[in-house]
Image (cartoon, grey):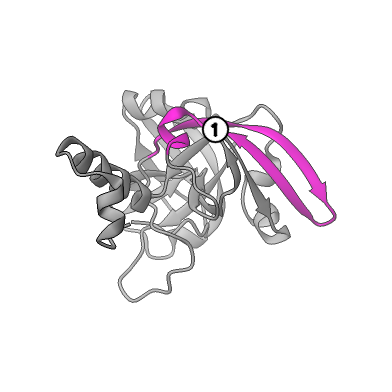
């Protein structure tokens, strides 16, 4: 499990078939074989360690359902190690299981800050909620003004400077993961609907 708080921006040093070698410094500190690392929001397992990079192996399914298939040597990537017990939790629950690929729709600068608008795939759009959480390329962000499959986020200077999102342009693809809490709630409500329990009844009993 991750938090969506990016630890470091690494760089792809080599891509060969299923293997991706990533140069890093911070995350290499205590990395071990078998550890999980989120690369642009995708949970991957460390398969090999070298002095200045680590290697992960990516399945064809992951390549097809995320932006990782577009990576080449030199590309910057967001990196976060899995959450350790007892750590501060600064973002939201991020599993590293990307729901789909969205894209940047609009960028509006507001001084040092910026308002970014994204288009989400249907796998993500159904879970968008005002002030809800979403992971974009592994970054924990807060949803603003969701309308159908469109939503905005307000980006602070630190996020723009310390992650890869500041390098994106309109039309660029991004990995998206919906909030796991929203997924469970919707799954539960769908189950109750199938059993004939109405939303009004749930509300009356204080469940929603």
Residue 77 screen position, x and y as percent = 55, 43
Q: Residue at x 48, y 29 (%)?
A: 121
Question: Which residue is nearer to you in this view: 147 or 106?
Answer: 147
Q: Is residue 145 above or below residue 125?
A: below
Q: In this figure, what is the number of numbered marks? A: 1
Residue 52 screen position, x and y as percent = 49, 52
Q: Is residue 76 left or right of residue 35?
A: right
SS assignment at label 1: loop
Farthest-out residue, left: 195
Residue 100 screen position, x and y as percent = 43, 31
Q: Main secondary structure of the magenta part?
A: strand
Question: Which residue is nearer to you in this view: 29 or 199?
Answer: 199
Label 1 packing within 10 angstroms: few (<14), some (14-19), many (20+): few
Q: To which quarter of the image does residue 111 belong? A: bottom right
| Residue 183 counted in the magenta span | no
Figure quadrant of the N terminus: bottom left
Q: Residue at x 30, y 49 (%)?
A: 200
Figure quadrant of the C terminus: bottom left
Q: Which residue is mark 1?
A: 148
Q: Residue at x 71, y 33 (%)?
A: 169
Q: Is residue 200 left or right of residue 129?
A: left
Q: Residue at x 42, y 44 (%)?
A: 178
Q: Which residues are magenta?
A: 98-126
Q: Is residue 148 left or right of residue 87?
A: right
| Residue 107 counted in the magenta span | yes
Q: Is residue 65 above or below residue 155?
A: above
Farthest-out residue, bottom: 86
Question: Is residue 47 at least partly visible in the picture?
Answer: no
Q: Is residue 103 left or right of residue 61?
A: right
Question: Is residue 169 at least partly visible in the picture?
Answer: yes
Residue 102 screen position, x and y as percent = 53, 31
């Amino acid at each position: 499990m991750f938090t969506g708080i990016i630890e470091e921006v690494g760089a792809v040093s080599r891509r060969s078939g299923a293997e991706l070698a990533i140069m890093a410094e911070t995350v290499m500190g205590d990395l071990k074989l078998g550890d999980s690392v989120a690369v642009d929001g995708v949970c991957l397992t460390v398969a090999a360690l070298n002095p200045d990079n680590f290697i992960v192996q990516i399945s064809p399914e992951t390549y097809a359902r995320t932006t990782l298939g577009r990576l080449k040597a030199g590309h910057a990537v967001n990196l976060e190690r899995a959450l350790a017990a007892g750590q501060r939790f600064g973002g939201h629950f991020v599993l590293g299981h990307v729901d789909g690929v969205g894209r940047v729709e609009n960028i509006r600068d507001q001084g040092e800050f910026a308002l970014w608008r994204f288009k989400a795939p249907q796998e993500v759009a159904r879970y968008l909620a005002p002030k809800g959480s979403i992971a974009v390329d592994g970054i924990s962000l807060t949803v603003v003004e969701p309308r159908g499959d469109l939503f905005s986020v307000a980006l602070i200077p630190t996020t723009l400077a310390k992650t890869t999102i500041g390098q994106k342009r309109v039309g660029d693809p991004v990995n998206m993961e919906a909030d796991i809490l929203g997924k469970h709630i919707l799954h539960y409500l769908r189950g109750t609907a199938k059993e004939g329990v109405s939303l009004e009844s749930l509300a009356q009993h204080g469940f929603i």
